[in-house]
C-alpha cells in the first residue's frame, strides 16, 4: 500500500481523461473491498482522487463523498455479519462529532490555503503516511 501511495502521488500523472467511468468504478470497488481488511483506505482513495487533477475544493469534496459512501457500505456489511454497534455507540458518536468538527476546521483552513500549497501539503502528508505504513510493515515482519 505504501509503494502504491508513493507511486500515485509522485509518479507520472496521466491526464484526467484517462480514468474512465469503468476505471473509477473499478478503483472504487477495489479500495472499498480493501478497506474491509486494511485500515489505510483513506490514503488509497485520496491518491486515486488526486490523479484526476481536480482543484482543491473539488478534490476535497469528491474525497469526502467517496469516504462517506465507503464507510456507509462498511457499516452495512458489518451489521449484516452480526457486528453490534450498540455497545460502541458512545465511541461512534464521538467519532461523528469529531469528524464534523474536523470538517468545519478543515474547510476554514482549505479556504485560506492557496492551491499550489494545498497540492504540496497533500503530497507531503500522503508521503508521510506511506513511509509510516512502510515502516510499520517492515517492523512487523
Image (cartoon, helix red, strand yellow):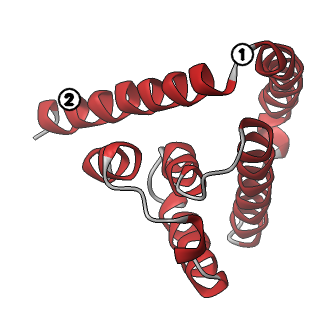
Q: Do the CB atoms of the residues marked 1 and 2 lie less than 8 Å apart? A: no
- The image shows a total of numbered marks equal to 2
101 shown above or below 115: above
Considering depth in this image, is 7 or 98 the residue closer to the camera?
7
Q: Which residue is mark 2?
A: 135
Q: Earlier in the sequence, mark 1 or mark 2?
A: 1
Q: In the image, residue 113 lies at what x, y percent?
A: 72, 15
Q: Is 16 on the left or on the right of 61, as rendered?
A: left
Which of pointers 1 and 2 indicates the residue nearer the eye?
A: 1
Please tell me in which quadrant of the rendered image residue 106 appears.
Answer: top right
Residue appearing at x 36%, y 31% in the figure: 127
SS state under label 1: loop
For this orientation, the residue located farthest to the bottom is: 22
Residue 29 can be seen in this image: no
Task: Please state the horizontal and vertical placement of residue 78, each as a whole percent of the image.
Answer: 69, 63
User: What residue appears at the point 68 percent right and 71 percent down from the top-left corner?
Assistant: 81
- Circle 2 residues within 10 Å: few <14, some 14–19, many ≥20: few
**Numbered circle sitting on residue 73:** none
- Which quarter of the image is occupied by the C terminus? top left
Position of 89 with respect to 3 (left or right) is right
Q: Which mark is residue 113?
A: 1
Instruction: Check disc 2 and report its element: helix, strand or loop.
Output: helix
Per the model, the C-alpha gap separating discs 1 and 2 is 30 Å
Residue 1 seen in this snapshot: yes
Residue at point 59%, 74% (across, down): 17
135 shown above or below 41? above
Residue drawn at x 57%, y 45% is: 42
Residue 20 percent across, percent down from the top left: 60, 81
Where is 139 relative to 63, above or below?
above
| Residue 133 point in image, percent of width and height | 31, 35
Asked whether 79 or 21 is in front, the reply is: 21
**In the rendered image, which quarter is residue 102 located in?**
top right
Amino acid at each position: 500500500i505504501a509503494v502504491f501511495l508513493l507511486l500515485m502521488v509522485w509518479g507520472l500523472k496521466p491526464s484526467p481523461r484517462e480514468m474512465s467511468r469503468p476505471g473509477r468504478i473499478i478503483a472504487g470497488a477495489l479500495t472499498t473491498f480493501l478497506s474491509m481488511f486494511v485500515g489505510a483506505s483513506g490514503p488509497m482513495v485520496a491518491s486515486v482522487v488526486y490523479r484526476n487533477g481536480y482543484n482543491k475544493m473539488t478534490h476535497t469534496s469528491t474525497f469526502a463523498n467517496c469516504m462517506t459512501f465507503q464507510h456507509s457500505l462498511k457499516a452495512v456489511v458489518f451489521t449484516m455479519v452480526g457486528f453490534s454497534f450498540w455497545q460502541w455507540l458512545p465511541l461512534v458518536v464521538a467519532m461523528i462529532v469529531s469528524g464534523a468538527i474536523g470538517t468545519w476546521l478543515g474547510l476554514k483552513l482549505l479556504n485560506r490555503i492557496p492551491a499550489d500549497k494545498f497540492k504540496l501539503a497533500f503530497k507531503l502528508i500522503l508521503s508521510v503516511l506511506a513511509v509510516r505504513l512502510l515502516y510499520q510493515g517492515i517492523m512487523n515482519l
